[in-house]
Structure formats: C-alpha cells, structure tokens
Image (tube, rainbow, N blue to C red):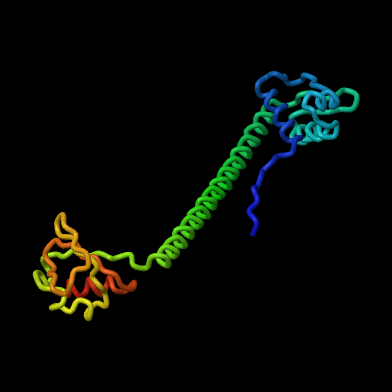
Amino acid sequence: MENRKVQVKQPKYQKIAADIASKIVEKKYLVGEKIYARSSLASQYGVSSETARRAIAVLQDLEIVEATKGSGVRIKSYEKAAQFVHQFLEVQSIQQIQIEMLESIKRQRDELNLLQETTERLVNRTERFRSINPFVPFQVEIMENTPYISQSIGTINFWQNTMATIVGICRGDELIISPGPYATIEKNDIVFFIGNDECLERVRKFLYPY
C-alpha cells in the first residue's frame, strides 16, 4: 500500500466565519454594528463572492449575525460568537493532534524502514565476508573450571570431540600460531579455532561440561 501524507484542511469559508467571530469577541465589531458587505469581505480575504456568502451564512445560521436584504449584515450576538470561536479552536486543536499523530506514525514507519534496510545491508555484507573469508576464527577463554588445564591438545582429542581446529593460542603477551598436538592449554589462555557455525557451542560444552 502506497504511503500518502494526509492533510487535514478546513474550508476557507469556515475560517473566515471564525475570524469574523473572533473580531466580535475581541470587540473590534460591536453588537448592532454593520460589517462589510459580501463583496468587501471577498476582497478583504482574497476569496470569491460565493465563499464570502457562505461565511456569512454560517454566522447567520449560528445567530451570530443577521443579514437582511438592503440592510446588509449586522452583529447580533457576542455570546454566540464566543461559543463558536471556542468550538472552532477545539476542532482545530483536535485536527492538530491528528496531524501530529500522523506525522509521528510516518516518522516511526520511516525509522523502521531505515532499520530494516540497514539490517539487510549488514546481513548481506556479513554473508559476503564469510563467503570471501570463511576462516574467521572463533575464540574461547580457558577458565579454571575446565578439567583440561595443562593438558595437551592431542591428549584431550580436541578436534575429535569438537570438530574444531585450533589455529592459535594467546597466552599473556604471546600469540602461538598453529599450535601442534603437544601444545597445552592453560588458565587464562584465549584459544582461537575455526569450524562450522555449530562448533562454538560444541567447544564450550566440551571445555565446560559441568
């Protein structure tokens, strides 16, 4: 489904009606005072005469103004103008909340899409890296609770029990590359080994069976 930005708009004539009502509340227009003719309102707000007529019709329906043929438009009720302004602002507030919610949802959707794209790039690069260099070693630390401290790699049958090949042992500041079967594993050693994805768990279970 295509994402579309939803815009909530109110008709121009409603905004004009609300603006006139606001001027009544602010007492820029007084009860009994005659306001502009429709043609003047259209010019003032930069709209068509029909839009101005609809704005006056709204105010007339709400009994805020009265329009009589030949007498023009006169202010009728301050209280009803105030009520209309209050309701109009409430509607605007609700619409603004709706707009903010829609924008928030869109931002979250965009962030999720970006996260998905980034994850896919990472997975693809990892798979390509593994295909180029499948010998990236795993590593495990030798701790005192293993039963094989000071025993040789050959004696404990490391490869036979784990299907993993030890390619290095880091001991303090020393790195032993390609240790043979007579090399021992000691406490605090870091053992580097290669194998399939399951061998890491097999090595851990072998070194720490309890």
Q: Count the labels in the image.
A: 0
Q: Residue furthest bottom?
A: 160
Determine the residue positioned at 69% across, 23% down: 23
Which residue sits at x=24%, y=68%?
A: 167
Among the 4 quarters of the image, the one containing residue 152: bottom left
Residue 198 shown left or right of residue 47 in the figure: left
Q: Can residue 210 be seen in this view?
A: no
Could you say where residue 183 lies in the image, as x and y percent from the top left? 14, 70
Residue located farthest toward the left when viewing the structure as drawn? 150
Of the 4 image quadrants, the one containing the C terminus is bottom left
Q: Which residue occupies 66% across, 44% down?
A: 7
Looking at the picture, how far across and down is residue 209, in whole percent? 17, 75
In the image, residue 196 above or below residue 127:
below
Q: Which residue is drawn at 63% across and 53% down?
A: 3
Q: 129 or 82, which lies in front?
A: 129
For this orientation, the residue located farthest to the right is: 70
Q: Can residue 38 be seen in this view?
A: yes
Q: If the image is split into quadrants, where does the N terminus sit? A: bottom right
Image spot of residue 142 (x, y percent): 16, 65
Residue 89's quadrant in the figure? top right
Observer-nearest of 175 and 7: 175
Name the side, left or right, on which 168 lies relative to 118. Answer: left
Residue 139 as seen in the image, left or right of residue 24:
left
On the image, which quarter does residue 85 sit in? Answer: top right
Q: In the figure, 116 relative to 180: above or below?
A: above
User: Where 91 sits versus 5, above or below?
Assistant: above
